[in-house]
Amino acid sequence: MLLGTDQDIQGIAAIIKPPVEDVVQFLKEHIQHDIRCIARSTGNNDDEAVQIIHLVLAGIVNNLGQQGGYQNIDCNLTTKDSRIVWEEAFMTTYLNPVLSAISHLLQDNLRRMVRDKRLGNNRLMRLIHEVDGPNYESITELDPMCPALWRYRKKITLEYVSFKFQEYSQGRDKADRCEVLAEFLKKEHQLRALQHFPDIIKLQRLLFEEFHRRLDRNEAEEFTLGKFLKRAPQIKEQFSALVNSFRMAWKIVRSSLTQDGPYSISQEMCRIEVTNSTPVSMFLPAKSGQGRCALALNNFLVTLHNDFIGRCKSLLKDESGPPEIPLANVTKAHLVAYDPEKDFLPMILAHCDYSLKVGEETTVEFNWKCLERQLVNRFIRGRPRLTSLVELFVFSKDICDGEVFEALKRKIRQEELTRPVQEQILNELNQLTDVCDVLKSLHIAIGFLSSAGGPPSMSIHKYLHSGLKMTPRNGLKSVKAEQFCQLQHIVSLWLLLSLERARVLTKRKQVCKK
């Protein structure tokens, strides 16, 4: 694409989504980023990453006359499946031969460069690559020309460990593959988000206590995190730490939340950043609006943990049923929760050996079996499954929607009020303000009853004042309703008063028009 900009820069610009202002600069920076990614994933420096690309391109040129694994492949890449097949064939034909022997190939390249008369007489290059034997006097005196001062040592990173493990696993028998470690490294980038899950649950629990059934959906979309923290400065430090955990987990897994599934979200939602201008609704699990982000994140983390634990138990041939724990009680001790730098990397360093030789690169050997054993014992064995479904946030105007009524009817069998009772209640509630006040109290009661249930024969009046501790001012305001209406009549009473309110409002509107 970069070369194509010399011939048709407009055509190249048209296929870059979203559009960029400087196409050439964008492609150059993209290539530099890709080189850094290759260097990081293979544990090499940028110069060696460029050599790896050269080796792959040389392999492609040298095998142009050979079809290899491409004989029956649709190279037009018209479907997702054809692209996957093509990528697997490319990996097998061109990448694996280079990556499986990368250390040897890079050393061979180094020797060729040193022997090249155009480069080999360069004194700095000979010092850097330790071509000449060590001068022990200069080492003692710490002379700037001492090769030891120029020596490059590979940094042990998780990406480098994953790359070396792939090298180790190729061609191994099943018994020597360390399958649990392989499964862990395959999922590691996502699993690191689990350390933040307990804080996310705590954040949502605190927000539920603050806003559950009391916050309107529109208010939640407009009420930002910054406004909330300013309104409650006494909890700012605690909430800021919990929100940061949500932010970290969101950054790690958001690109995976667009995959097909009941809780997937759109690409547009995935691009949302968590800042002080983020609406509070993003942290409240809901089936619509920005709350879908929290719902998708929670369900993804639950599924990730349970699937990984189940897969590991299968690989370990552990047939015992795992313990279970409700989501509300989860802590880090229940999860595959770890900090990559503070927990996993020290474990890796404890199971690797360095060897140093003059004129050669540092050799790092890993004891994969011991590493896998410690990984299982520390982060996997005994971990429970997470059971409860993610609790959805109920907004104030959603309390009496169809789903809530259905949940209430499953908890408490409902009966209709008789016509005479309905008429007497309406006669006593002859003011619109009284009807609206009673409906507000019924909203709150229905929200709680749909979750907790209650005895059908208990009077609504008693439930409001004894169960929910409402003041007398927030009662039913009708003697007949207080005497006769029970929890099994609450839906019928709500419908009666809702219709009455709608009738009065409609009548008033018509009078105003006249």
Image (cartoon, helix red, strand yellow):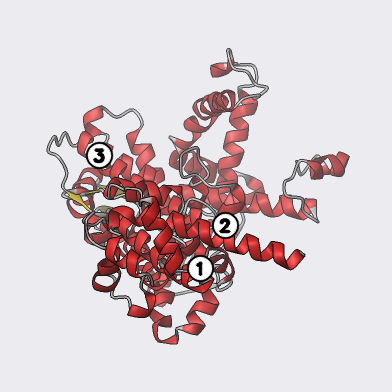
Tell which circle, 1 or 2, labels the residue nearer the N-terminal end.
Answer: 2
Q: Name the residue under label 3.
A: 310
Please, what secondary structure does the residue beneath circle 3 have?
helix
Amino acid carrying label 1: it is Val
Report crowding for label 1: few under 14, some 14 to 19, many 20 or more residues within 10 A (C-alpha): many
**Viewer-closest of 300 and 498:** 498
Amino acid carrying label 3: it is Gly
Report crowding for label 3: few under 14, some 14 to 19, many 20 or more residues within 10 A (C-alpha): some
Please, what secondary structure does the residue beneath circle 1 have?
helix
Kindly indicate whether the residue at mark 2 contacts the one at mark 1 (C-beta within 8 angstroms). Answer: no
**Viewer-closest of 432 and 157:** 432
Q: Is residue 488 shown left or right of residue 233?
A: left
Which is in the foreground here, disc 3 or disc 1? 1
Q: Name the residue under label 2.
A: 125
Q: Is residue 392 shown left or right of residue 46?
A: left
Which residue is rendered at x = 29% and y = 71% of the image?
Answer: 468
- Farthest top residue? 72
Q: In which quarter of the image is residue 315?
A: top left
Kindly indicate whether the residue at mark 1 contacts the one at mark 3 (C-beta within 8 angstroms). Answer: no
